[in-house]
Image (cartoon, rainbow, N blue to C red):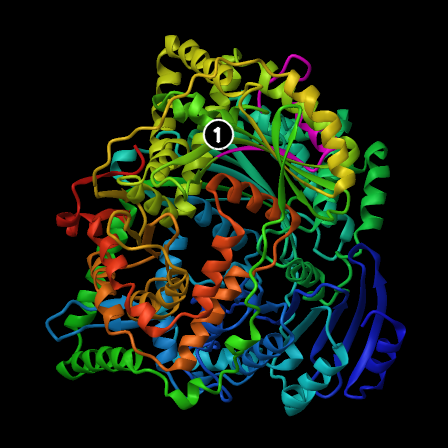
Amino acid sequence: MSDRSNLEKLKDITQYRVLKETYIEEMNSQGVILEHVKSGARIFLMSNDDDNKVFCIGFRTPPEDSSGLPHILEHSVLEGSEKFPVKDPFVELVKGSLNTFLNAMTYPDKTVYPVASCNDKDFRNLMDVYMDGVLHPRIYREPKIFLQEGWHYEMESPEDNLTINGVVYNEMKGAFSSPESVLDRYTRAVLFPDNSYANESGGDPAFIPELTYEQFIRFHQTYYHPANSYIYLYGDMDMEENLRWLDEQYLSRYDRKDCPVDSSIPLQKPFTEPVQREITYSVTPEEGTEKKTYLSVNTVVGTDLDPKLYVAFQILEYALISAPAAPLKQALIDAGLGEDIMGGYESGILQPYFSVIAKNADKEQKAEFLIAVKGTLRRLADQGIDRKSLLAGLNYYEFRYREADYGSAPKGLMYGLWSMDSWLYDGDPLMHLEYQETFDFLKQAVDQGYFEGLIRQYLLDNPHEAVILVTPEPGKTEREDEQLANMLAERKASMTPEAIEAVVRGTRELREYQEEPSSQEDLEKIPMLGREDISRQGAQLQYTVKEEAGVTVLHTDLFTSGIGYLKILFNTDRVPVEDLPYVGLLKAVLGYVDTEQHTYGDLSSEIFLNSGGLDFSVTSFVDLENRGQFTGAFVVNAKVLYEKLDFVFHTVTEILTRSKLDNEKRLGEILDEVRSRSRMRLDDSAHAAAVSRASSYFSPTSAFNEMVGGIGYYHFLEDVAKRYGSEPGYRKELIAKLKETIGRLFTADNLLVGYTADQEGYAVLRRELGDFKASLPAGDQARYPFAFEPGNRNEGFMTASQVNYVARCGSFAGSGYAYTGALKVLKVIMNYEYLWSNLRVKGGAYGCMSSVGASMEGYFVSYRDPNLANTNAVYEGIPEYLRNFSIEERDMTKYVIGTISDIDAPMSPAVRGSRSVSAYLSHVTDEMIQKEREEVLDVTQEDIRGLAGIIQAVLDTGALCVVGNGQKIREDEALFKNIQNLYH
């Protein structure tokens, strides 16, 4: 729909009323806002030449309480519908569609169901299943969907203890295990006590069991009507055809006058004075409570319907808190008020708010904290914010808005979510998409006191404020578990034998329902492509190996809109194995300390004024030609307009060779922050941490990754931070070690460069690279081969979490088996059939993941899992499942298509460049990629059965690691060789 004639066609569809049409210059798209006349459905179209098409239907779903109704319904409506009566159409689509995105998300005030695909036929199939799911779900005929996804009482026999299980119930037990999540949820409840934001849309585990099936059904009847819906279409498609289809198949069946609710969210009445509240979070008894409190001040900032505020407070977040030397953050650190300063602008709800959070403080510091925050803000408002910092923040966000690179998420999806930040509140969906005028205004406003005025108006003279403390409570998880167990024991004791038998019968019937497969007839109602619809030609690698000034350059020649994506890699084999954790620490130190030319604050501003960002990482690339070998690399990542490439090279030289590490105070601040952020990452990705740790028992690559970024690295940080604070002599020792590591690593003879740009961009690189190489020291060329002691440690890491992350890992190297593309198909079978059915559907875990790769290493892991030993037993059952694997050929094809969907996922230029570097260092060739693709496309059931031996070899490795609930780990202690607290 790229020309006027297509718009005229839309006006000819009398079932819709065109409310607005405009060209959106920022997205090179034609935007049209419509209304479906009969049903009242809101429609927003963005038509352009992007073949990664996006569809989303969303509903405004303000929660009425904290029972998790919107969240449980989000899970449940994709568990079958009138047209597609199978148990889990969502999983069937994951298995058998070419989707580039497929999910559903619950927010504090809305529930959205987005899909994306580059294939027209597949895209229509996805739309059909999702529309039927949300409007005509099977929940009305099958209450067991509610029991499975929400909550239910469980007893296998009358003698068993009464327990509670359910997917969302366990998911939210996991979500509320981190103090950051506790603070986030409680902040909205305190700031908005009189509207729906006071309630937890995801569900509070304490209240989820109060939800009834009748309330569940009534919520769908109330909110899932087209008149309460927001439908979004994006990309290169026939919009007229899709609109006619939506009307004929779905919307014409509804009348707007039958919508039973006005779901609009009332504004919270402003506070007349700030409020103060306190809540606790759980820590293990061994962790103690000193310096474990979160101090926060949170202030409501207008509404999401102000496009200037929407961007301006993102800039203020950078200038006040996020930038390395942000004045508000620095003032709190200098005053000893917290070891890590976080917070910022929380939008995406009707009334956004701005938070300042001091993590790892003491409760008694509350008054000092408030004085420091308000005093610093008053000084900035009166004396002015650093102009360069504001302009750097503006440039950073404008670069992000323009680049629109969201990793694996289609940019069309992100545009749709942006539009909801105004559309949901009866504003124009274009409000935040047409951003250029806002940026132009804000650039002028920097010199007009605008940002200082925002501080005064919203952060100083605004009584709609909440001071919230989140304090540690040792053993809280154990006490809550005990209270729940006692409550359930009392409930069971009060039940009649008939009531107990009813629970046992309900448990059995739910299990039978879960184990009974959908009929083949119903499964065949889910539309899918055939193998013949898929190209047999795999995507070719796009890089060329070149040499410039004696440096190997991997050039990925792509159109990048004038942005160069640069990677500079330094091989970590220049560093002795015992010093590798310091390489991990360097990625957090460099760029955050002064250099000879700049303070670290000024350095950050310079970077964002002149580029799209510069960061450091440490990673590894497994060598597929030489088993057991890998390349470890310290990587400099930058994105920059071609004409600014010289700036990046000069800045990288400055950071790598002229950073000043002798400021002991600054280094201590960095240690505190990096330890805090590393712990947050462990909390958020405990499943990945468990896999990395278990794999490190046998895999050199994973052992390296553990040393520079896993649980082992976190324990290194704990030790370093403790010694740094208590042993004055250790400080100079640490500084000397970092300097020594820099001297070994960043040398002219240890360079590999990856660059993604077109020929014009590459010409600039060729011109600049020689000078960059010459700016680095020569180096002594000493190499230190990586060595480690393999052996299963099988650890249980106890945390205050209420759930578990259970990882079983291993290798089939030396087993006599070869890698085959069939293992990629097995991943889909595991994740959405065997593991999904046994761990999620029956076991109540929120998630499950697996992979067995060309490295001959594999893993199986659960996510937010109430079980432990039972989960390990499920892993043990995989080989037997595979030996007896037998399905219809249509289902086999479905798994193939689901596998290709993952292989053929669209990649941004930056991702393509990263793929080139990885392929080069891992020795992946086009021939290997093509062979794997053909093995996927031609896979048979016999091939899958033949994988049983590979999986048995992986399991026989016997590597197990669990991060999770201390009581559960102790109950199953026979599985472990070592049990310890994750956090010391």
Quadrant of residue 459 in the image?
top right
Name which residue lies at 22% across and 80% down.
508
Q: Is residue 156 visible?
A: yes
Q: Which residues are magenta?
A: 592-618
- Which of these two is toward me, 189 or 390? 390
Name which residue lies at 68% across and 58% down.
418
Q: Residue furthest left?
A: 159
Report how many numbered discs are placed on residues in the image.
Answer: 1
Viewed as shown, does residue 192 lie left or right of 169?
right
Which quarter of the figure is the N terminus placed in?
bottom right
Q: Position of residue 976 (x, y in %)?
A: 17, 45
Quick check: 156 above or below 310?
below
Q: Position of residue 682 (x, y in %)?
A: 39, 42
| Residue assigned mark 1 | 673
Query: How busy is the neighbourhood of tag 1: few (under 14 within 10 Å), some, or many (20 plus)?
Result: many
- Which of these two is toward me, 265 or 268? 265
Quadrant of residue 131 in the image?
bottom right
- Which of these two is toward me, 280 or 60? 60
- Which of these two is toward me, 533 or 350? 533
Amino acid of disc 1: Glu
Check if residue 595 falls in the magenta segment: yes
Name which residue lies at 62% across and 52% down.
406
Check if residue 634 falls in the magenta segment: no
Quick check: 793 above or below 501?
above
Q: Position of residue 85 (x, y in %)?
A: 44, 86
Viewed as shown, does residue 858 lie left or right of 467?
left
